[in-house]
């Protein structure tokens, strides 16, 4: 029985660990049960091999049909039938306790527990993975002319905070900032938006712009204000060139002064809402200029803003 427990318990634990990313809390519960089964089997295999265990004034001795427990002068004999019941209790009780504890643990990430965490949003179960961090890009558009895109409202940010609270993490939200431009600074730097010099954001401004940015600041424990871009691209007379921080099609860095202007605009719009320049960045299309030996690389430029 002990040998079977070792094999079965080990198989369960290893199997669930490998598949646990998709099974969530159930996987952790099954894994710990398997671990205790294996531990139980190892202990009893050792006892059976030794025939008798001694510790100070206590001992545990196996005979053919009974177990003799000597505890500080008291002797307890268990027949084969009673011994079977005791073994079941020793297996079930710690497994139940460990499983109950583990089922109520809210792990912070994959470094602390096997599996993923599930939360309920409007009656729908959403499974959240636990990577090192979660980044959500394209945060910020307040209005959109495309029929398949809806404007981002305060309620969207409240949902992000709710997820962060339930999962126990800080979501890195990287912003496209142009729609929050209160002074139309983008018009002075025409490569930042598709409207170029004709950029006019005044008709689109509303009270909720301030509410959203204040909400982001008030909930910085769950939303990290990050840099994505000003307009998500490099624009020339309304034409979009892919890659705001690097020329993807041409596979070359953009003009340094132009890119520097984009960083400046992002910083200025952030200051319109008393926000500090972001400490984190995810570039559009994940494209940026990498060159450790150049003072004009994306990293070198951003380091000037802290």
Image: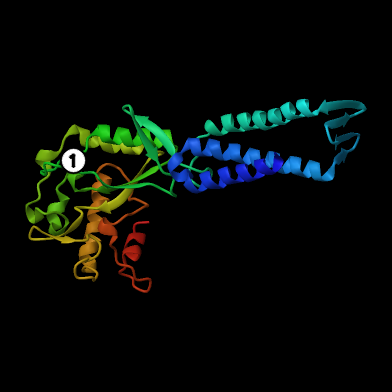
Local crowd at mark 1 within 10 Å, few (<14), some, or many (≥20)? many
Residue hosting label 1: 142
Query: Measuring 46% from the left and 38% from the top, which residue is drawn there?
Result: 24
Q: Position of residue 220 (x, y in %)?
A: 38, 39
In front: 104, or 227? 104
Task: Indicate the quadrant where residue 42 lies.
Answer: top right
Q: Position of residue 269 (x, y in %)?
A: 23, 48
Residue 291 versus residue 287 in the image, above or below? below
Residue 70 versus residue 180 in the image, above or below? above
Q: Work out whether residue 185 can be spotted.
A: yes
Q: Quadrant of the C terminus?
A: bottom left
Question: Farthest residue in the bottom direction?
Answer: 293
Q: Position of residue 15 (x, y in %)?
A: 53, 46
In this rendering, position of residue 157 left or right of residue 72: left
Query: Measuring 62% from the left and 29% from the top, which residue is drawn there?
Result: 97
In front: 141, or 286? 286
Q: Work out whether residue 211 can be spotted.
A: no
In this rendering, position of residue 107 left or right of residue 65: left
Task: Indicate the quadrant where residue 85 lies.
Answer: top right
Q: Quadrant of the N terminus?
A: top right
Query: Measuring 24% from the left and 68% from the top, which residue is drawn there?
Result: 256
Number of numbered discs on residues = 1
Colour logic: rainbow
| Element class at badge 1 | loop
Q: Position of residue 243 (x, y in %)?
A: 22, 61
């Amino acid at each position: 029985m002990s040998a079977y427990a070792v094999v079965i318990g080990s198989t369960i634990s290893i199997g669930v660990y490998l598949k646990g990313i998709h099974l969530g809390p159930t996987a952790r519960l099954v894994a710990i049960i398997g671990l205790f089964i294996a531990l139980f089997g190892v202990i009893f295999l050792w006892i059976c091999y030794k025939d008798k265990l001694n510790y100070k004034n206590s001992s545990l001795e196996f005979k053919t049909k009974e177990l003799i427990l000597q505890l500080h002068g008291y002797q307890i004999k268990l027949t084969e039938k009673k011994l079977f019941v005791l073994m079941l209790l020793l297996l079930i009780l710690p497994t139940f306790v460990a499983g109950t504890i583990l089922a109520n643990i809210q792990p912070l990430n994959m470094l602390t527990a096997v599996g993923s965490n599930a939360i309920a949003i409007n009656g729908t179960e959403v499974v959240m993975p636990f990577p090192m961090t979660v980044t959500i890009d394209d945060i910020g558009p307040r209005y959109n002319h495309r029929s398949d895109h809806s404007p981002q409202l305060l309620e969207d940010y409240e949902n992000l905070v709710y997820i962060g609270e339930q999962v126990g993490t800080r979501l890195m939200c990287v912003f496209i900032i142009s729609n929050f431009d209160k002074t139309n600074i983008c018009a002075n730097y025409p490569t930042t938006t598709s409207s170029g010099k004709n950029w006019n954001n005044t008709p689109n401004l509303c009270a909720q712009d301030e509410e959203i940015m204040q909400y982001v600041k008030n909930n910085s424990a769950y939303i990290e204000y990050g840099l994505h871009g000003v307009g998500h691209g490099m624009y020339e007379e309304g034409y979009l060139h892919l890659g705001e921080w690097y020329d993807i099609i041409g596979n070359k860095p953009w003009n340094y002064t132009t890119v520097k202007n984009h960083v400046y605009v992002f910083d200025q719009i952030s200051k319109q809402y008393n926000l500090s320049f972001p400490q984190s960045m995810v570039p559009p299309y994940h494209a940026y200029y990498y060159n450790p030996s150049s003072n004009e690389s994306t990293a070198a430029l951003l380091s000037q803003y802290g």
